[in-house]
Image (spheres, rainbow, N blue to C red):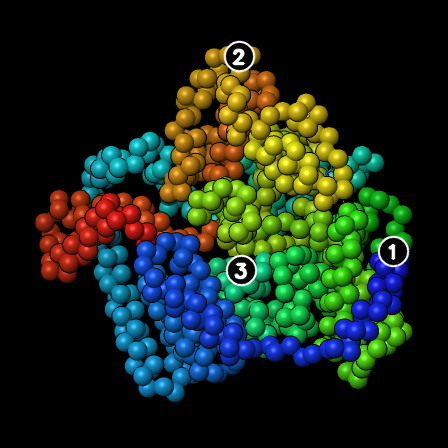
Amino acid sequence: MDNERQAIIRALAEPKVEMTLKAWFKRPMKSTDASIKARVDGNQLFIAKGHNSEMHENIWKFYSESIANAPSASNELALAYGNRSALLLHLQKFQESIRDIDRALAITTSSNLKQKLLKRKATCVTALAEDETAEDIGNKTKVLSLNKEELMKNVSNIIPNNDFNFSEKVEEDKAKIQEILATKKAADPYDSVSIQHNEKFGRHLIANRYIKPGEIIMVIKPYIKCLNLKNMHAFCGHCLKTSWATIPCDYCNWCMFCSEDCKQEAWQQYHDIECPVIPYIMFDQLGDYWKQLALRSTVMAIREAGGIQNLKEELDLVDNCNSKLHKGFLNGKFYNDRFQSIYSLSDHTSEDALKVHIDHALLSLIVLAKSTTLFGRNMKFMKSKDLLSNKDVIFIGSLLLKFLKISDINTHSVMEGSSLCRFSKNLNQCLEDRCCARGACIAPIPSMLNHSCDPNIRKCFTEDMHLIIYALQPIKKNTQLFDSYLGCYFQTPMSQRQLAMKEFNFTCNCTPCRKKWSAILIDKTKTIVKKENEDFEQKLFDKLRPLFQSTKNLDAHYCLSTLDYLSGNIEKATSSLIPPSYVTALLISTLWTVFDYIYGMKLQPVYHLQVCCTNIVFVVFYLSNKTYHSEKVHVLCLLQLVYILAYVFLDYTIH
Ligand SMILES: C[S@@+](CC[C@H](N)C(=O)[O-])C[C@H]1O[C@@H](n2cnc3c(N)ncnc32)[C@H](O)[C@@H]1O
């Protein structure tokens, strides 16, 4: 860490450090004004007409932000929980709404608010009871063995090309998917790959055997993860899972958690140290992932090693290892959950990025020194010489810088499980707005993956935040696994890819870059099916057209057999079609849509069309069965009809 050490010493000697220390101010952790502002912003959106999914999510984020900012046990906190509970009721998330109502009731002293909350709770409880009744009716449908084919025919008339939208085996599939994931989580990540090193690629992963498209290579837990700035108030800041009814940290106005368990675990692992630092460093989107990941990695490493002194000794061992392959290995193995592994990862950032990282490391270091007890309870850092003369401060500053550089190169985005934006935005807009990118993580074994613009693997996150690496193309024994860092050749033009690659400080020399393949799936000037591939490509395209088209539909459903079907076709296409082939590219991009749909995490908004179709099935069933013509079911049927009409005539989206 010599380079980082020198950079930190130089930075600490700059006049701006003295000025920062002189002008030091205590940042307010919670703020009544900020809480009120976020709640009012949420209210304004809530009362506006024509809500769509994106608006609902924004209102939810405003109310959560209001909760995060409200001082503990304050009236503002009760009001913020109360308002979020109203939204959750509107979204028919009754259980979550009740949780927020109970939290508000436990705090508020206002009898007016209490009355409103109790009324809302009664509505939720009634709705939950009705849900049970509806479930009963559904179960009875199965007993009566309703003519399912006929029902599906009705639905097919509404959704053309329904072949791939309906799986007879959905329930069977669900159990199988869970079983596959559990087996893979328990398996050794090195079952089908090993780490190798050469001068051209540095460390990389090699297949130990043939791996077929769609096959899961490993499922592992990231070492460290965080949310991005846009989503700090939306999901659990520790496990990153979706939770509609989050609870705030008692001190800072940033972190929220899905449960008391997550809140406690985060506190014990890193949040006790991070809590006073976060409000100072999370002021903009620049490096929001890196700053958090570096800070969390530093605190976790100190804890794992058993103190700063032990950590210094452990890291010296890594630094003194002469083997480029075995750096960070422990007892001959590269673990996914040890700080030594993270510390040994590649850190070749660009010169421009380095300047930004030094500034970020410096800021985190100063706040750690001023606002925490990391360097001792009685330490007072009044002047820059106090920082410069403290060996632990220099060491932690160097480590923060090192982890910032490592995070820059080795971060995996935690994305929603779909290749389509939830709000139907184009890829660039979606990335810029961070609609589907929830956060980021570091996982050392997947960090061994090098880049190719024609990748043979892809990553996907499960609902419980495990990282899956799966094959996109056939991978022969002893060949390298390649990920795509910033876009594949068939979707992203070469100029854009090469610009993005500068961040990683290497020149991509993959076949699409060398042979200048066109971005075949978006380049409208090229003929779709190549002459050389003749009939086969056209035939394959015609056969798979409905499946390809289904990927443009957010409401499409897929099952495990769709994945097998695609896998077989990719094997056929890659062995028979001359690349670059339009159909092979389509097959690969369809495989990831299907795989991510099956295994990936989603925010799971209920899209209107889905609800509408379910309602049509219900109404058809009701009209054709006199057995259930009770008063209650009449009302239900009428409501379903209103819903269908609203969808058809008003194009009104409801979660
Ligand atoms: C996430 S790491 C991948 C593992 C890395 N090879 C190592 O030795 O740790 C990313 C870095 O690997 C190198 N790299 C990735 N893809 C490459 C490629 N196709 N050719 C050469 N170097 C590559 C670059 O230095 C990049 O910054």
Q: Which residue is drawn at 36% across and 37% down?
A: 165
Q: Can residue 182 be seen in this view?
A: no
Instruction: Please name the residue that numbered disc 1 is placed on.
Output: 3
Q: Is residue 228 visible?
A: yes
- Is residue 315 rendered to the left or right of residue 445? right
- Is residue 232 rendered to the left or right of residue 611? right
For the C terminus, which image quadrant? Answer: bottom left
Of callouts 2 and 1, the N-terminal one:
1
The type of residue carrying mark 3 is Asn
> What separation in Å lies between label 2 and label 1 (alpha carbons)?
55 Å
Q: Nearer the viewer, residue 395 or 312?
A: 395
- Is residue 637 rendered to the left or right of residue 27? left
Instruction: Please name the residue that numbered disc 2 is placed on.
Output: 531
Q: Nearer the viewer, residue 156 or 367?
A: 367
Mark 2 beta carbon near ligand 1 (under 8 Å): no
Secondary structure beneath disc 1? Answer: helix
Disc 3 residue crowd, few under 14, some 14–19, many 20+, Cα 10 Å:
many
Of callouts 1 and 3, the N-terminal one:
1
Q: Which residue is drawn at 39% across and 68% down?
A: 43
In the image, residue 423 sits, relative to residue 499, either above or below, namely below
Secondary structure beneath disc 3? Answer: helix
Disc 1 residue crowd, few under 14, some 14–19, many 20+, Cα 10 Å:
few
Mark 3 beta carbon near ligand 1 (under 8 Å): no
Q: Where is residue 104 in the image (x, y as percent from the top left)?
A: 40, 78
Contact between marks 1 and 3 (CB within 8 A): the answer is no
> What separation in Å lies between label 2 and label 3 (alpha carbons)?
48 Å
For the N terminus, which image quadrant? Answer: bottom right
Of callouts 2 and 3, the N-terminal one:
3
Q: Position of residue 565 (x, y in %)?
A: 46, 30
The type of residue carrying mark 1 is Asn
Q: Which residue is drawn at 85% across and 59% down?
A: 7
